[in-house]
Image (cartoon, rainbow, N blue to C red):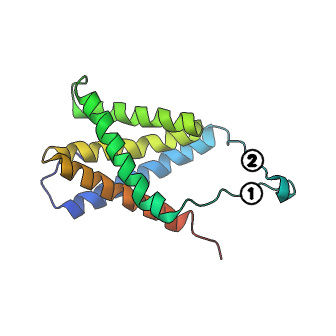
Amino acid sequence: MTRNDGPKALYLVQAYAALVLGTALIGMIAVSVFSAPQVQVAASGGGVPQPAQAPPVVAFVLIWPAVSSLLLWGVLEGLRRVLPTYWHVAGAAALVFGGLFTWLTDLQGGLIFTWPYFIYALTFLAWHLRSALEGLVMTFALQVAAHLTLSVLVFAPVR
């Protein structure tokens, strides 16, 4: 994950595989160890929990990865100044984003988001060695792939 001397497409495939497999594993552990979050019941739903609405595709697949990549860049730049290695920086950035998502959602959500941000951080740091633009582009591309997968598998309407 820290080498950038091969083809970009191969790197993205490997990073994507690590991201999906790690997130699935952590997700299964988080769901089995920690209690499920409370589901809001809509008053008009007759007491039946209503599924969360899918986010707008463009915002979820393009805008959030762009914003997230820029935020990650800022966090990484700050952490690189105080931590000794890229592994420490990536781990600390993952904890920062995990804490943020825990605060915004719940403990399960925070744990599940920590692994992807570790992979995103490693991706950015590996490609940042070439240029900041390459770090941003590769991180953005990886996030788009992950969010596109979620859009298709999780948020697609059930028929």
Q: Residue at x 54, y 35 (%)?
A: 102
- Mark sitting on residue 156: none
Residue to which mark 2 is pinned: 40
Residue 75 spot, x, y in % from top left: 33, 34
Residue occupying image coordinates x 30% and y 61% = 13
Gap between marks 1 and 2 measured at Cα:
7 Å
Marks 1,2: beta carbons within 8 A:
yes
Residue 81: which quarter of the image?
top left
Choose the circle earlier in sequence order: 1 or 2.
2
Query: Between residues 122 and 29, which one lies in front from this camera angle?
Result: 122
Residue 137 horizontal/vertical position (percent): 25, 55
- Give, as a three-letter code, the residue at label 1: Gln
Q: The residue under label 2 is which amino acid type?
A: Gln
Which residue in the structure is indicated by mark 1?
Answer: 50
Residue at the outermost right position: 46
137, above or below 111, in the image: below
Q: Which residue shows up at 47% across the image and 58% down it?
A: 60
Q: Position of residue 59 (x, y in %)?
A: 47, 59
